[in-house]
Image (spheres, grey):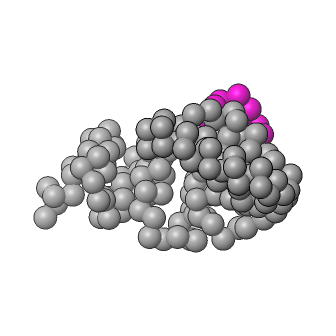
Amino acid sequence: LGNGGYTLADESYSKAIRLDPDEAYFYYWASMAKVGIDKQKGIDDLSKAIELQPRFAVAHNARAAFRSYVGTDYESSLSGYEEAIEIDPTVAVYYTNYAKSLWNLKWWDKNSREQVLKLNDRALEIDPTDYRIHGDKALILMYLDRGQESTNEILEFQKHARTTEDFKYAESILAYNGAQPWYFNL
């Protein structure tokens, strides 16, 4: 979508909100339309959706992601992910989003580092098919100077890699960890 597409979607959801201002989903979808226009307005729409429906887990997750992206309120972002997880602990992406934000905010904190790994492990328990989580773990383990564990994770990531970018990412992690790419081991 170019900005024109976002603008058309925003206009449509604004009209829906005018027709039914008490429907939380309209504010949620309006926020998604605003992602390419004005993230702060998207945050405002998500706040309204949560006000109308406090246990709207996906809205808590989305607002936390917007706040992380805007970079103005990281602590609220983290608490937003915690709320989404508390409301619905069965969604893997809530854990991975929380892990990424926590890493970005507190990568230097040893306790946070371990929590990030645990969040990713929990996401893998919920959705073992999301190979990207292995890539996230590999990068974190690389920064923690845990090369062998990082290599094991990136090899798991590489088994399921789908794009050229995935393979390039895996090779860069493997090169840093001093391991040979998987195809040298055949």
Q: Quadrant of the C terminus?
A: bottom left
Task: Give the percent coordinates (x, y) of residue 17.
Answer: 75, 51
Residue that appears at 16% across and 58% down: 183
Looking at the rendering, the stretch of residues picked out in magenta corresponds to: 69-76
Q: In this view, does 51 lie to the left or right of 12?
A: right
Residue that appears at 24% across and 49% down: 164
In front of the other: 55 or 85: 55
Q: Is residue 183 left or right of residue 128?
A: left
Task: Give the percent coordinates (x, y) of residue 173.
Answer: 34, 44
In front of the other: 102 or 107: 102
Q: In which quarter of the image is the N terminus?
A: top left
Please indicate, yes or no, whether residue 62 appears anywhere in the rendered image.
no
Kindly indicate the quadrant of the structure image that contains residue 109.
top right
Kindly indicate the quadrant of the structure image that contains residue 126.
bottom right
Q: In this view, does 132 lie above or below 109?
A: below
Kindly indicate the quadrant of the structure image that contains residue 67.
top right
Task: Give the percent coordinates (x, y) of residue 151.
Answer: 36, 52
Task: Give the percent coordinates (x, y) of residue 68.
Answer: 64, 37
In the rendered image, the residue lying farthest to the top is: 72
Q: In this view, does 42 lie above or below 25?
A: above
In front of the other: 108 or 68: 68
Residue 183 painted magenta: no
In front of the other: 133 or 27: 27
Residue that appears at 71% across and 40% down: 43
